[in-house]
Amino acid sequence: MHTYTPQKDYLKNKTMLVTGAGDGIGKQAALHFAKYGATVILLGKTVAKLESVYDEIINNGGNEPAIVPLDLKGATAKHYRDMANTISDQFGCLDGLLHNASMLGHLGPFTQISEQDWQDVFQVNVTSQFLMTQALLPILKKAPHCSVIFTTSGVGLKGRAYWGPYSISKFATQGMMQILADEYENSNIRFNCINPGATKTAMRAKAFPAENVENLKTPEEIMPLYLYLMDDKTSSENGQTFEAQPK
Ligand code: NDP
């Protein structure tokens, strides 16, 4: 998958929503989808970061993006319904959705997981994806071919000591993806997960503050898999978990 190079403009006429589009992997995904012709909806918490991605897309000659400032921690079902209605009015349908935003929370022993941290991590990493996907399904169904990508982690495939709520939230994300993939089998929508693998971002630095970052892949280097899963040519891929950095 490292070398997947799609055709120029293969995402032309497609509208794609990326969560956590202001930084790290989500930022690169938004820039790449725009580079290949998509109109990108940039959702994230920090408006200044989203504006800077907006400017970069415009400067690169991409379609004008839309910005959705939203803190997933406080967002309710109504926020997502309103967002879906706005996207429907503006674009008619949604062809791609990348659930990328998430929070790490505190890493530490199971006995020291606070109820607040558990709730925050689950709200941002799981509940928001549930509510957003449910609200967006009517406009995902309207797209000729639609790809929904969730983001998991190595600790969402095998539990690891001290990774508590984050790890468990990634198992839940995999479960949500598999349930949706099964329910929508043989439809226009497919659902898959990407495990980015160790990637040089702010979240990685928070989790591994002492590591030597020289050998880490950059978000840009792992983009081929994201481009692959948004391509209509790969629409038979459904219910799978893909490694952006296969061993
Ligand atoms: P970053 O922390 O670099 O970026 C996360 C993005 O999500 C930021 O744009 C951030 O916005 C946004 N975000 C976080 N919390 C919220 C919130 N409450 N509401 C709205 N937006 C929010 O992380 P990565 O790029 O490293 O991670 C991207 C995905 O990849 C995550 O799901 C992560 O779990 C997964 N992953 C990453 C790995 C890695 O090595 N980097 C490895 C395995 C999985 P803002 O900047 O405004 O805070």
Image (tube, helix red, strand yellow):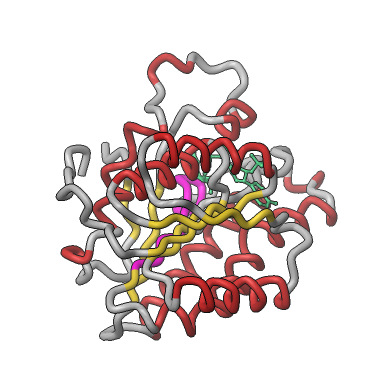
- Is residue 239 placed above or below 30 in the rendered structure? below
- Is residue 237 placed above or below 107 in the rendered structure? below
Q: Is residue 149 magenta?
A: yes
Name the residue rendered at 30%, 85% in the picture: 187
Q: Is residue 154 magenta?
A: yes
Position of residue 229 measured from the top left corner of the image (x, y, whole percent): 28, 58
Position of residue 7 measured from the top left corner of the image (x, y, whole percent): 15, 50
Q: Quadrant of residue 216?
A: top left
Name the residue rendered at 44%, 69% in the picture: 177
Which region is colored magenta?
Answer: 147-157
Q: Quadrant of residue 93?
A: bottom left
Judge by depth and name the residue closer to the eye, 195 or 72: 72
Judge by depth and name the residue closer to the eye, 96 or 208: 96
Ligand 1 quadrant? top right
Position of residue 197 measured from the top left corner of the image (x, y, whole percent): 41, 39
Quick check: 37 left or right of 31? left
Judge by depth and name the residue closer to the eye, 154 or 87: 87
Q: Is residue 179 something that shows in the picture?
A: no
> Which quadrant of the figure contains the N terminus?
top left
Name the residue rendered at 22%, 52% in the picture: 9
> Which quadrant of the figure contains the C terminus?
top left
Name the residue rendered at 53%, 46% in the picture: 21
Position of residue 38 measured from the top left corner of the image (x, y, whole percent): 35, 56
- Is residue 181 placed above or below 194 in the rendered structure? below
- Is residue 6 placed above or below 133 in the rendered structure? above
- Please tell me how many numbered marks the rendered image carries: 0
